[in-house]
Amino acid sequence: MAKVVLENISKHFGTVPAVRDFNLSIEDKEFAILVGPSGCGKSTALRMVAGLEEPSGGNIYIGNRIVNDLPPKDRDIAMVFQEYALYPHMSVYKNMAFGLKLRKFPKSEIDQRVRDASEILGIQELLSRKPKQLSGGQRQRVAVGRAIVRKPAVFLFDEPLSNLDAKLRVQMRAELSKLHDRLQTTIIYVTHDQVEAMTMGSKIVVMKDGWIHQVGAPLEVYNFPINQFVAGFIGSPVMNFFPCRVLQKDSRLFIDAEAFQLPIPEKKSPYYQSLTGSEAIFGIRPNDIYDRLHAPEHAKGNTIRAVVDVIEPLGSEIHLNVTAGKHNLIARVDVQTSVQVHQEIELVMDLNKMHLFEKDPPNLRVKTEA
Amino acid sequence: MNRWRFQRISNRILLYIGAGLFVLQAVFPFFWMVSTSLKPHVEVFAQPPSFIPHQPTLDNFKRLFTATNFLTYFRNSLIVSGLAVLLTMVVSTAGAYSLTRYQYYGREKIAGLILCTYMFAPIMVVIPFFILVKKGGIENTHLALILAFTSFCLPFTLWLMRAFFKTIPVQLEEAAMVDGAGRIRAVIYVVMPLALPGIIATSIFTFILAWNDYIFTRILITSDELKTLPVGVQDLFHSALIDWGLIMSAGMMITIPALLFFVTVQRYLIRGWGAGAVKG
């Protein structure tokens, strides 16, 4: 039973700030994901929870205890490292038993737990091997096994899948989700991969330059990104952005992107009223842009003309790189779309899914969890 | 037989002949030492020389053990070398660990300076060291010798251990600490086993240096009962008549422990090298 709370946490390395004013509350049994580009402070935040780094300021709670001054061994946590960090001189069995042995568990219990964990992870046959005799995926499993035998209150994962090949990564992703379901333990998971963040977490924390930019459920962050950084970081292919000006005509708001003008839907207008007359960044995801012939009914009407530069047929969908005016866009269109390079095409934007961001916001850090 | 095959075999044969010559050159003095130590007095100078003693005898060894102080020197050598190894290992392991794992001002400079001290030849250091020891009131003691060997080996061993610790990922220690070890247990259970080849290499180095040292012992030790083997054995033979049988048996007795030490620990040198700790 462990809720993890980070309260006003900051961390400096010398004069370089790594994590700034970090406030986050992770509920018991929650699968929280810290995601962001490299150097955003996500690993440092995790290492502070583990006790491997000391915060420069603020408090960390695990359960109801402040753990700032507790060494890692007394925090009731287990961690899976990016490079696995298996003890090379010990067999898989001993690697997994090590933590229990240090805690002086009786031999029979150690044996039971190691066998249970290896069964869950399908590594029973590997118990007598040394880490160097294992493949990357197997080492990953052992590293997870070493964490779960301890039955800790909180699991910490530091980019555990980044050394695996793409196929194995997809498989392990699903397995880790299943594992969380089965163990019902709090997990804090660090990754730079937004797909892992979207698919695994129940709460994702988007970070950049040491700041938390947004905290929320995956779909909430995807659908309502709070700024341009979050919008661009979450989702693949990346959201299209271009600068525009917000205009008001007869009480209706428009965006003016020089090559075309688009009306802002009525229900979105109140949110963007404050931007009227100023420069802004318009954003729309590639999957909210349709070829006119295959557009859904509710989106029709917001047509723009564009020239196709590149066609990427993926089998189930087609990615079009197009130029509209002076803006480059990516559209994810229906496989039925028949189009040629350099050809002009009519695209429809579903403006109910549009986003509008402040240009050069004075403070990039927009929102931290209350 | 085809030409390539012939060439390959003849190359191989040449290689073995060459290697054989080197081995012979290295082994012959040993062989001669063993042979002479087992010869009776009259056979030592026999012409033509006999490679294998006609009447092998242990007489030389008997005289070495009973008529001389050899056993005392032997014990002294063991004590001094053993303790020098122990002290060197403790200090260099702790020092190297600190140099690789902690952040502090001038860390890299310290490491560089340490290596600089190794550039001084022992003969340059020995007189200042003697004065230092005299001021400290420990001249003519084993402690002085142990300190001398340790301070002379430390720069090299510290540097070597530092290189070893650098190859051990910090993550392993962190994993151990999360697993439930404090720093000390993490070092004992995880770092030390992985640094074992380094520990052994440095202990071989220190042991052999201490075991063979002549200069420091000659200058720092004056009492006969405190001398170590190289100096003690040298002092046995100052007369005009050189007893080669006795010298060679003493030589054998000096070689055996060093050889045994080396043979027992060298196989650990190779072990433990296997990585696989982190992605590889």
Image (tube, helix red, strand yellow):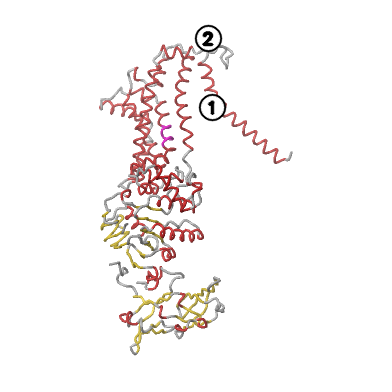
Whether residue B3 sits left or right of residue A133 in the image: it is: right
Q: Is residue B36 above or below residue A302?
A: above
Amino acid under disc 1: Ala
Residue at image location 37% in from the left, 55% down from the top: A155
Q: How many marks?
A: 2
Can marks 2 and 1 be said to lie on one chain? yes
User: Magenta part mainly helix, strand or loop?
Assistant: helix
Q: Nearer the viewer, residue A278 or A294?
A: A294
Q: Which residues are magenta?
A: B199-205
- SS class, disc 2: helix
Location of mark 2 (residue):
B42
Amino acid under disc 2: Val
Which x, y percent locates residue A286?
46, 75
Is label 2 in contact with label 1 (beta carbons under 8 Å)? no
Location of mark 1 (residue):
B26
Q: Is residue A152 above or below residue A342?
A: above
Which x, y percent locates residue A225?
37, 72
Identify the image quadrant of the C terminus of chain A: bottom left
Q: To which chain does the residue with label 2 belong?
A: B
Which x, y percent locates residue A93?
45, 45
